[in-house]
Amino acid sequence: MLKSKRLMELMMTVNRKKRFKVQELADEFKVSKRTILRDLQELSELGVPLYSEVGPHGGYQVLRERVLPPIAFTEEEAVAMFFAVHALRHYSSLPFEAESVSALNKFYLHMPGDVRDRIDSMKNRVDFVTPTRRGDAPCLGILLEAAVHQKVLTVEYESKEEAARCREIQPVCIYANNGFWYCTAYCFLRKGFRVFRCDRIREAVYDTSGTDPIDLGDIRLSRQHAAEPRDPVRLRAELSRSGVQRCEAELWLVPMLHVREDGSGAIDKDVSRSDIPFFAEFFIGLGNETILEGPMELKEAIRRRLSDLLARYQ
């Protein structure tokens, strides 16, 4: 086996193993222990974080921050990968902010000169615009980790209606929409699923009160499965084609839409009564692109809001 190929396979092998001994690798690759030691030294110089332990039960292990083996990209794939990560710069907070910047720099610097020139020429020609929001979301990392490992968090959350208060939540997922980060989670205070604005989570730590996590393995990245209206009322509205398109731009609203073949649509779904002020503002924004059929409380809320606006501009 050529040395270059052996080093490549050795890198993949040590990344796959939690712990290993030199003799095990020597037997697997059918080379001497001295050869394996030299190969491990070269991998270490290339940046593979190897840690050695002495003693009868010692050996080698790869530290938690593993280095992945090289991947061969075509030029088109490389450009697509670059701009996929480059688009994240519009977000003031990311769950892997430092890592994405580091990865993008490595990716760019190791490209051939002509590919870098092509990317530079495209930077002012293509972008994925996301509104830049002022509020940071410093807890994205721990929210994502808790969602992956199904852990309970104690968070300090400040909602639009309430001052900051502590509560226990178990995150299901995080997602970005229109420049904001959101976290769908089971709230142990409200005994149900809720969606939290991540920039309103002031602090998040792993729960130490003994609250047992629940099995959320069947719930995925869809608010349609997680939403449970409180004190529900039936929202019914007809939408023009333009109204449907505007609604489709709102991630939270997509599961509620029924779109017809001609592009028009309708909403017929239970929503929480406490969300009526929010829906009033939203349907006012839709203007003539919708006909609201119910509930009556929402119609009255829209009339009050429009009356207040008229009084302000008289």
Image (cartoon, rainbow, N blue to C red):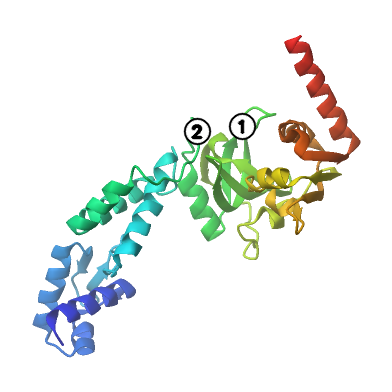
Q: Residue at x 63, y 48 (%)?
A: 251
Position above or below: 306 against 218: above
Q: Residues within 10 Å of mark 2 (few under 14, many from 20)?
A: some
Position above or below: 283 against 144: above
* Image side of residue 119 versus residue 221, left or right: left
Q: Residue at x 50, y 31 (%)?
A: 135
Of labels 2 and 1, earlier in sequence is: 2
Distance between mark 2 and mark 1 Cα atoms: 17 Å
In the image, residue 78 lies at what x, y percent?
A: 32, 61
* Image side of residue 297 versus residue 223, left or right: right
Marks 2/1 in contact by CB < 8 Å: the verdict is: no
Residue, disc 2 = 133
Q: Which image quarter is the C terminus in?
A: top right
Residue, disc 1 = 158
Which amino acid, by three-letter code, is at mark 1? Glu
Q: Residue at x 23, y 84 (%)?
A: 24
